Amino acid sequence: MRHTVRLLASAATIALLPVLPLYAADYDPPMVIEDSVGPLQEIVPVEVGSGWYLRGSVGYAFATSADGAFNYRVFNVGTGTYGSAAFTTASVAGGISYGIGFGYAFTDLIRADLTAERFNIRFNGTRTFATPCAGFAAGTTCVSNDSATLNGTTVMANGYVDLGTFAGFTPYVGAGAGVTHVSWTNLSSTYACVSGGVACPATATTPTTANGQSSWRFSYAAMAGMAYDINDKLKVRLGYKYKKISGGPMSEFTAADRALGASGTQTTDPGFTQHEVKLGLRYEIW
C-alpha cells in the first residue's frame, strides 16, 4: 500500500512539471526606476526681500554754528557798481528736525538707507552803515536789525556699520552724503537812525523786507549711537549726528534798491554745522 502511494505522488509531480513554468512566466518582477538626478532634494522656500526696513526719527539741534561770515552787497547808485561787506553781528539757532527713510541690511553688520529730513535754522544779525538811513539827514549813521528763517530739506544716502548685538543693544557708526534744499524766508530788516553830528528825529526806524532765495546745497554727515531690540522686527535708536551744509544765496535786494538799478542776490550765508541728538525707530518690513 505504501509503495502504491509513493508511485502516485511521483506521477503527480511529473504531471505538474510542465505547468509550473507557465505560472512563473505570468509573474513580472517589480520595476525599479532610477532617479537620474540623484535623491530628491528638500524644497526650501527662498525668503525674498529679507533685510528691508523703514525708519523714522525726530531730533534736536543742540548746537548750530555758521561756517563763516554772513555777507551782503552794497549797490552804488552813482557808479552802478557793487561793494561787499559783512554783517556786523550774526547768530543762528537750530531746533526740532524730523525725518523718514528706507533701507536695506546687507548683513548683520552692514546696512544702508536713503533718508529725507526737514529742519530749520533761525538767523538774527545787524549791519552798520557809515551813511544815513534812507530819508534821514546827513550827519547821522544807520544800523539795521535783520532776521530770517532757513527751512531745509536734506536728502542723503547713508551707510552704517553695526558693531554687534549685546543683550539686545547694538552700537553703530555711519556716514552719509547728499543735498539740502535751502529756502530762506523773507529777510526782515528794521533800519534805525543813529545820531552823530546831527540828532535823529523821534521816529527813527524804517522797516523793509527783501525776498528770500532758495538753492540746493551739498551736505554730508557722520553718525554714532545705540539701537535696542524691542522685538525681532522693531528697534529703537538713540544717537548723535554731525551735519555740514554748504553756503549759498540768502536774499535779494529790496524793492527800493531794485528801483535804483540793483539786481541779483544781496545777502549770502556761509553754510552751517549742526550737532544733533536723534531718537528714532527702525521697523523690518520683510
Image (tube, rainbow, N blue to C red):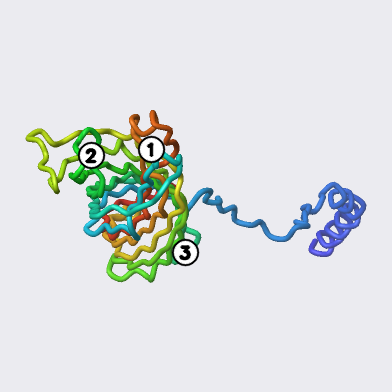
Three-letter amino acid code at disc 2?
Cys
What secondary structure is found at the residue carrying circle 3?
Answer: strand
- Front residue of this view, candidates 133 and 151: 133
For marks 2 and 1, give the CA distance.
Answer: 19 Å
Q: Is residue 77 above or below residue 8?
A: above
Residue neighbourhood size for the residue with mark 1, other residues' Cα within 10 Å, grouped as few (<14), some (14–19), many (≥20): many
Towards the viewer: 205 or 57: 205
The picture places residue 233, in percent across and down from the top left corner, at 35, 52
Residue 259 in the image: x percent, y percent? 38, 28
Q: Is residue 162 toward the left or the right of residue 201 in the image?
A: right
Q: Which residue is mark 1?
A: 252
Question: Closer to the camera: disc 3 or disc 1?
Answer: 1
Q: Which residue is mark 2?
A: 133
Any part of residue 52 in sight = no
Residue 111 in picture, x, y percent from top left: 46, 60
Tag 1 secondary structure: strand
Residue drawn at the location 64% of the way across and 57% of the way down: 41
- Foreground of the two, 36 or 263: 263
Residue 110 disc label: 3
| Neighbour tally class for label 2: few under 14, some 14-19, many 20 plus, Cα within 10 Å | many
